Amino acid sequence: MKKFLSLLLIVMLAIGMLAVAGCGGNEEETAITKLVVGSETAYAPFEMVDENTGDYIGFDMDIIKAIGDAMGVEVEIRSMEFTALIPALQNGQIDCAISAMSITEERAQSVDFSDSYFDAGLIIAVAADTKGIETLDDLKGKVLAAQIGTIGADACVAVQTEDPATEVKTYDHVGEAFMELEKGGADAVVNDLAVTAYYIKTEASDKAKMVGEVFQADDHYGMPVQKGDAATLALLNEGLAKIKADGTYDEIYTKWFE
Amino acid sequence: MNFGFTNTEWIFGTMILDKLNEIHGFQVVVNNLPNFGMGALLTLEITVFSIVIGMVLGLLAALGRMSKVKVINSIAVAYIDFFRGTPLFVQILLLYFGIIPLIFDATPVQAAIIACGLNSGAYVAEIVRAGIQAVDRGQMEAARSLGMTQGQAMINIIFPQAFKIVIPPLINEFIMLLKDTSLVSAISVPELTHTGKMLYASTYEAVWVWGAVCVFYFIMTKALSILGDWTERRLATE
Amino acid sequence: MIVVKNLHKSFGKLEVLKGIDCHIDQKEVVCVIGPSGSGKSTFLRCINRLEEAQQGQVFLDGEEVTAPNADINRIRQEMGMVFQLFNLFPHKTTLENVTLGPIKIKGMRKEEADDIAIKLLRKVGLGDKDHVFPGQLSGGQKQRVAIARALAMQPKVMLFDEPTSSLDPEMVGEVLEVMKGLAYEGMTMIVVTHEMGFAREVGHRVFFMDEGILMEEGTPSQIFDNPRNPRTQSFLSKVL
């Protein structure tokens, strides 16, 4: 037992050192010529895979490409799990991310965010024949579905904290949460308005509907970069300002949301 | 109260603990030990129930696979081929979102047990079949020459000998199954890996969170293999 | 007692038995000799249908063993078989090897079966080995247990498939002694063997088989001293 405990301590210490090493050093960059951008490409209409060409498309994809064009840098998209984006930034595996990510205080402790590029909010979606669910209060004691690591999931957990009878089912991708709703395994999905609207319009106009008001409307999407990476941050903000000024942003917005 | 450590060891140990406590990831892991424990318990529960289903199905499928009745044989072969020939991850999604809802309303945990049990059954079937075929042909002949029916010979002569042969590969299969239950996190089963995902999504402590998840899995698989070694030794001395 | 009519057996394209006709009387000891691959063992195994013949018939006391609807499990109880490789059940003690048949097949009470088994084990000279597992026995001892196991079913006839071929030379004698004892008690026996001494001394009749054909049969003195068939002559000149 003694031996085992000492061994356990040593192993934990070793893991700790690795963790510290992993967080290490920002390399100084001179001129940025290429951006490696992480995105969870299963969140239509912000990011998705074109069924025919296999390319990454969506609102976010158009925005980051436009920023790249405006700033004269190459953009490479790397598809990954949503929960992997911030760790990948911390490890320097990607330069920035664009993935319909809300700017939150909690996240801002781990990464720096660009200026907001999209105003979002959360909405409740229920099966088409559901009655009696309109507000967050109505969700108490119900079965809720959401995507792991999203503010929608946070909202569900907040409901559960108020009423422990509430069940929260969380999935790697929002599509699985919608599937759960469709097959009757959940009473409601809490997720970003734009995505839920797009999903219901394209996939489930007869099976699901949005109810109630948009909430957490002070929710804004930003592009995270590694903490302290001022160069990339400046590039993103400058690019964003440029495409907003020259009308490119509006074109893209119209293309996806109107 | 030094729990049997010498003073030097005790002081050194507490020093290390103090240092660790300054690390955020360590705190995350320590504060969430109950959550990891709950997740590990569910992992264990799914594994145990899947093993039971897998053993029953595996035995039936193995016998079906060796049956001379064409229909039974074909069903067994189709079952084994399908579940061995496609990824468990896909089977879990197909069963939970596609097939099980057509039959009854399953909770994610029930669906996980069904999927893992069905999958394991196919592997157990092949292990059992190999075990039965590894018993010397002369054993069946000797039993039949005494006047035993095929069934009597199987139960009295072949199975007891095949049992010893299949124990090591079966334990191996159970260890694989325990690890594979991590895939059911995809259908929102809050087992060990899902616990890790949730914690990781809110803390971004990849090394600490996944390191802790590994330690929990390792403890469980190690316990299984120790159990396996013990069983093997007991059978060997009989 | 046993009648064999026009027995044919092939493994794929290889014809192993090409029409065997013979009869064996009660209390008769028949030794089957011949070169390797002559079909001796297959002939024996066709009698209790461990191998299924493609053509021909086998009768035991007038009942057709080879009939499709024959109750083969009951008929086999009346034909004990001893194998070249013993085929003892390794997970059972010698006593259990012997009692398993009577208990599981005949539904005999354990005490009764134990009684019979102990007597049989004594008879084959292994009365003190009842709680030993087969792995701890020598080859000769294993084969004697196998004989006791077959006898426990109280068969009408005993089939021996080269019972001494895989034994070390010094153990052949003890097994042959047991078989000799059985023969003198009047057991009907068919013995496939390479032990010419045993065939000459114990056999009432000797069958010489070659290439799937029963080439010659007769009393031991006819076969060993005055073989008529040239193949028999050539075989015996090699082995004697």
Image: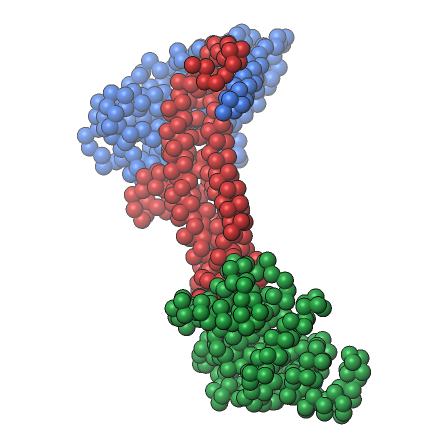
Chain colours: A blue, B red, C green
Relative to the observer, which residue lies in front, C169 or C191? C169
Q: Quadrant of residue C194?
A: bottom right
Relative height, residue A251 to residue B54 (above, below): above
The residue depicted at 40 percent of the width and 22 percent of the height is B33
Residue B132 in view here = no
- Residue A216 is situated, as x and y percent measured from the top left of the image, at 31, 16
Residue A76: image x %, image y %?
Answer: 57, 23
Which residue is found at the position 31% from the left and 26% from the top? A190
Q: Residue at x 46, y 11 (%)?
A: B21
Q: Is residue B200 visible?
A: yes
Task: Tell me where residue B32 appears, x and y as whole percent.
Answer: 39, 21
Locate residue A75 relative to residue A129 in the image: left or right.
right
In the image, C192 versus B30, the foreground residue is C192
Name the quadrant of the C terminus of chain C: bottom right
Residue C107 image point, x, y percent: 39, 70
**B99 horizontally vs B19: left or right:** left
Farthest residue to the left: give it.
A132
In this picture, residue A13 sits left or right of residue B100: right
- Is A245 situated above or below C41? above
The mark total stands at 0
Residue positioned 48% across, 35% down in the render: B223
Between C178 and A34, the one nearer to me in the picture: C178
